[in-house]
Image (spheres, rainbow, N blue to C red):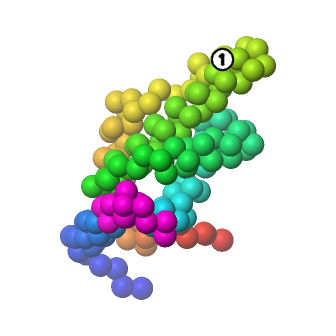
Amino acid sequence: MILSKPDEDHDHLAREHRAHDETIRSLTKAIRSGDEDSFSTFHDLYSGRLYRHLLFLTRGHEEVSREILQITLIKTARKFPRFEREIQLWSWLKQIARNSLIDWMRQEKRANDRYSAVDWLETLPAPDTEADSELPAILNQALADLAFDERALIESAYFDGERQN
């Protein structure tokens, strides 16, 4: 196997990120104009990732996560801003999902007088803490420190959505 030089790897990754951001710009612009196919593409790209995030927030409660995912997707369909970068889109989606979960928990408490829902609400992670803003840089540096083949494996699993057996 031939490995490329680190500078070439970095240039290649930078080009991929720019291309990905251009895709996000085009996709969100099309969604704002009412293009249903673009929303379907968005759904295919983000519903699984958003569901996994909700599983984290709900501490593994699959039924609640599925319900909040549907609520979140409905909210995004109604008001979808144009984004320049994927990180902006993902931050917006996480915030809508978290707020949808909080609203759902408040509604559950009112409907069922569940004190456990309020207790559970208090355990949710705070949105966009300082650590969250530093995380991308830390992860990018960790990826840059990996050997090319290891980095390619991680990128294919987490960024390209490929399954590893």
Q: Residue at x 37, y 71 (%)?
A: 148
Q: Is residue 106 left or right of residue 28?
A: right
Against 70, is 9 above or below? below
- Residue 66: image x %, image y %? 68, 46
Q: Residue at x 49, y 70 (%)?
A: 37
Question: Which residue was labeled with disc 1?
Answer: 118
- Does residue 49 appear anywhere in the picture? yes
- Does residue 6 appear anywhere in the picture? no
Q: Is residue 132 left or right of residue 17?
A: right
Residue at the extreme front of the image, as rendered: 34
Against 126, is 37 above or below? below
Q: Is residue 154 magenta?
A: no
- Residue 146: image x %, image y %? 38, 61
User: What quarter of the picture does the C terminus occupy?
Assistant: bottom right
Residue at the extreme right of the image, as rendered: 112
Q: Is residue 64 left or right of residue 132?
A: right
| Nearer to us in this view, 134 or 6 | 134
Q: Residue at x 42, y 85 (%)?
A: 1
| Prevalent SS, magenta region | helix
Against 132, is 78 above or below? below
- Residue 74: image x %, image y %? 56, 47
Against 102, is 38 above or below? below
- Residue 143: image x %, image y %? 37, 58
Q: Is residue 138 left or right of residue 41?
A: left
| Nearer to us in this view, 155 or 40 | 40
Mark 1 crowdedness (10 Å alpha carbons): few <14, some 14-19, many ≥20? some
Q: At numbered mark 1, what does the secondary structure look like: helix, strand or loop? A: helix
Q: Amino acid at mark 1?
A: Val
Q: How many marks can you see? A: 1
- Magenta stretch in the rendered image: 24-37
